Amino acid sequence: MRFLETFFNGAVMAKYLPDLLSAIVTTLWLSAVILVLGLSLGLALACLRSLGRWYLTLPIVAFADIGRALPPLVVILICYFGLPGLGISLSGPMVLILVLAAVLAAFAEEIFWAGLTAVPKGQWEAGRATGLGFARTLFEIALPQAIRMGIPPLVNRALAITKMTALGSVIGVKEILSVSSSAQSFSGSATPLTMAALAYLAIFLPAVLLSRLLERRYSWAV
Amino acid sequence: MTAPAPVHQRPMLEINRLEKRFGETEVLKSIDLRVAPGELVFVIGPSGSGKSTMLRCCNRLEEPSSGTILLDGEHVTDCRGAALDRMRLKIGMVFQGFHLYPHKSVLGNVMLAQIRALKRPKAEAKARAMEMLEHVGLAHKADAMPAELSGGQQQRVAIARALALDPKVMLFDEPTSALDPELVGSVLKVMRQLRDEGMTMLVVSHEMGFAREAADRVVFMDGGVVVEAGPPGAIFGNPQSDRLKSFLARVSKAAE
Ligand SMILES: Nc1ncnc2c1ncn2[C@@H]1O[C@H](COP(=O)(O)OP(=O)(O)O)[C@@H](O)[C@H]1O
Ligand SMILES: [Mg+2]
């Protein structure tokens, strides 16, 4: 009974449910924006890198390496607490979106690029020999194959990044973790944290299952 | 004074003093070759003699170091950017490794460049693709994915993909070398049919039997030069140079 009382207290649940629901909505839209921005920026960078110009490749590789090396929390704190000193004040959600999208873009660029380099040279030659230009060959022939190869690591990375929306709790973003941990300190009950865990499961378990479907949908025998 | 050659005698493909260097290594040393309209020219020679490089220079997959290449009187070697892409539409190429697009169906493979490069309307491209697949005996595989096909079928799709663009010349780089022996015949059959329809063809291959029976002319390359050229009867029946003699001896020994 102690266990139920601690983790599944009905009265506490009822009290904080509305707050938590709105936090779930916040986490969802933050994740969606981060995924769209991060994946498209990563894809665009990989495409630019495929042009093989050093003045593009150099900054892209630097961005990808730094973005993958720095702990996201450090960057979030620097942007949230440091930038105002330069006269740039960004809201918590804004900082969270920009930083996590940039980190995702850094990883996604490397994944898309790895896929592009793994596309056999003969595929490019077949495209070019049939009169397709560089861009058409890239978009119609190389990228679809690169994306397909990248889907498993991309899905893992996307899940990892969206879970990092919980870092928003340190800069006052009203997402699931921050709402439930403040509820926990107000109520003195661990139940809100249980609710947070359930909420994360409710979001990410379907996402994991969906990703399995996606992997199957985009696989073809070679 | 000799009379000017009649118009129909103008070569379809003309390679003049073609040279290609990779860094220090000279791979092609002044190659001259003419292919008349409707002619099937067969290129033989030991591995590393520069046969693939010569073919790949014809559509500029390799950049020639010097020399000129003309297709039906038009310079291939001067083209850049979009003009080169348009020129490549007229030069069909078939690779040893097929290089079908694994993410597209057979039909999609044959339609892609028609739509994206030749700018054919989709319905027309589809009709043309089906016609070409019919031609290579694979219309019933239109909706299959490349991985579901045998090597011989994949190569025939690759031929259909090139033919669908209505090229003026077809280049074949060892089209049957990657195939199991029992599948070679199906590809050669399509090539013979093409030849009978009057397609101009430049074929690099080790299928000597096919060369004897279908080639108008055989060119023997070694060490980046054309050592000997002539009708198949003369090349195989009465080789002049020692290099060709020893090459033919080696090939026939390997075939036994
Ligand atoms: N991209 C390249 N870079 C350097 N050397 C090359 C390249 N492509 C071909 N070669 C060299 O050129 C020579 C001719 O090759 P290739 O044209 O493939 O001969 P073949 O098709 O007759 O076997 C070989 O010695 C090969 O090593
Ligand atoms: Mg070769």
Image (cartoon, grey):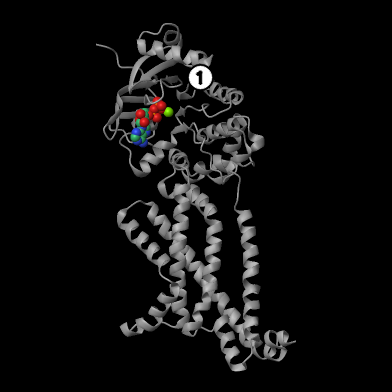
Residue on which the image places disc 1: B207
Identity of the residue furthest to the left in this view: B1
Quadrant in which the N terminus of chain B appears: top left
Image quadrant, ligand 1: top left
Secondary structure under the numbered disc 1 in the rendered image: loop
Q: Position of residue A94 (x, y in %)?
A: 45, 79
Kind of residue at disc 1? Glu
Q: Nearer the viewer, residue B86 or A86?
A: A86
Is residue B10 visible in the rendered image? The answer is no
Q: Residue at x 41, y 36 (%)?
A: B88
Q: Residues within 10 Å of mark 1 (few under 14, many from 20)?
A: some
**Where does the C terminus of chain B fall, quadrant-wise?**
top right
Looking at the picture, tell me which residue is in the foreground, B163 or A11: A11
- Counting from the top left corner in percent of width and height, residue A100 is at 46, 72
Looking at the rendering, which quadrant does residue B245 occupy?
top left
Which residue is located at x 43 percent, y 69 percent? A102
| Quarter of the view holding residue B142 | top right
B247 vs A201: above or below = above
Q: State whether residue B148 is above or below residue A109.
A: above
Q: Reply above or below: B122 against A164.
A: above
Up-down: is B47 above or below A15?
Answer: above
Rendered residue at 50%/16% (across/down): B254
Whether the residue under disc 1 has CB within 8 Å of ligand 2: no
Q: Position of residue B118 (x, y in %)?
A: 47, 42
Label 1 resides on the chain identified as B
